[in-house]
Each structure stands twice: as structure tokens, then as C-alpha cells.
């Protein structure tokens, strides 16, 4: 998740970043939202591609919403191994 925060600081020109972490049932949820310029693209060799790869390696899923002018939101869901 550090990659998402680094991107917000370096590229988004955000004045605010919100981070929320929850453990529900057997799932960890991490939500990161900024009020920056938006337009983040995982296909542009960004660090978001690497973050997505790491989330998927943990059998997780990541959704990105980043419309130009409306900031960027990431939602990461990672299953917890409950035994």
C-alpha cells in the first residue's frame, strides 16, 4: 500500500489522502482515496501494476478508479487465512 501513498504524494497533487483498513470475516480491506488530479493508469508502467501483481499473488483483488479531475481510489481485498 506504500506504493499507492507514494503515488499520491509524487503524482496526484492531492491535498488529502484517506486510508481505511478493515478486517471483516475472512477478508482484509484497504481503501485509499485522494483528491488529486486523477488519471492514474496501470497500463503506463506505473507502480500500480506492481501493486496489483503483489495483491493478486496473495489471492486478492484490487480495483482502481481514477477519472481525470476526480482523484484516485483504490480498493484492495485480500483473503485472510483463518484456521
Image (tube, helix red, strand yellow):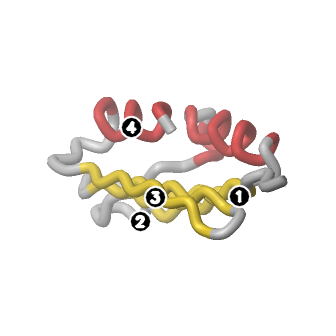
Residue 31 badge: 3
Q: Do the residues labelled 2 and 1 touch (CB within 8 Å)?
A: no
Position of residue 10 relative to residue 24, above or below, is above
Answer with the quarter of the image where residue 67 lies: bottom left
Left or right? Give the position of 26 relative to 35: right
Of labels 2 and 1, the one closer to you: 1
Residue at the disc numbered 4: 5
Tell me the number on the disc at residue 61: 1
Sequence-earlier tag: 3 or 1: 3
Residue found 39% across the figure and 57% down from its top: 20
Cα gap from disc 3 to disc 1, whole angstroms: 12 Å
SS state under label 2 = loop
Camera-side residue of 39 and 73: 73
Residue 13, image x, y percentages? 23, 42
What is the secondary structure assignment of the residue under circle 1?
A: strand
Q: Which residue is drawn at 78% across and 47% down?
A: 56
Q: What is the count of numbered marks?
A: 4
Identify residue for label 2. Answer: 67
Give the number of the mark in front: 3 or 4.
3
SS at badge 4: helix
Tell me the residue at 27%/50% (across/down): 17
* Above-or-below relation of 56 to 33: above
> Residue at 51% of width from left, 39% of height from top?
1
Amino acid at each position: 500500500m506504500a506504493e499507492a501513498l507514494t503515488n499520491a504524494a509524487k503524482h496526484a497533487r492531492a491535498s488529502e489522502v484517506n486510508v481505511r483498513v478493515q478486517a471483516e470475516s475472512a477478508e482484509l480491506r484497504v481503501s485509499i482515496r485522494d483528491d488529486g488530479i486523477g488519471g492514474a493508469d496501470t497500463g503506463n508502467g506505473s507502480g500500480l501494476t506492481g501493486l496489483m501483481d503483489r495483491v493478486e499473488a496473495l489471492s486478492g483483488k484490487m480495483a482502481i478508479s481514477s477519472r481525470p479531475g476526480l482523484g484516485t481510489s483504490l480498493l484492495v481485498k485480500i483473503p485472510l487465512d483463518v484456521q
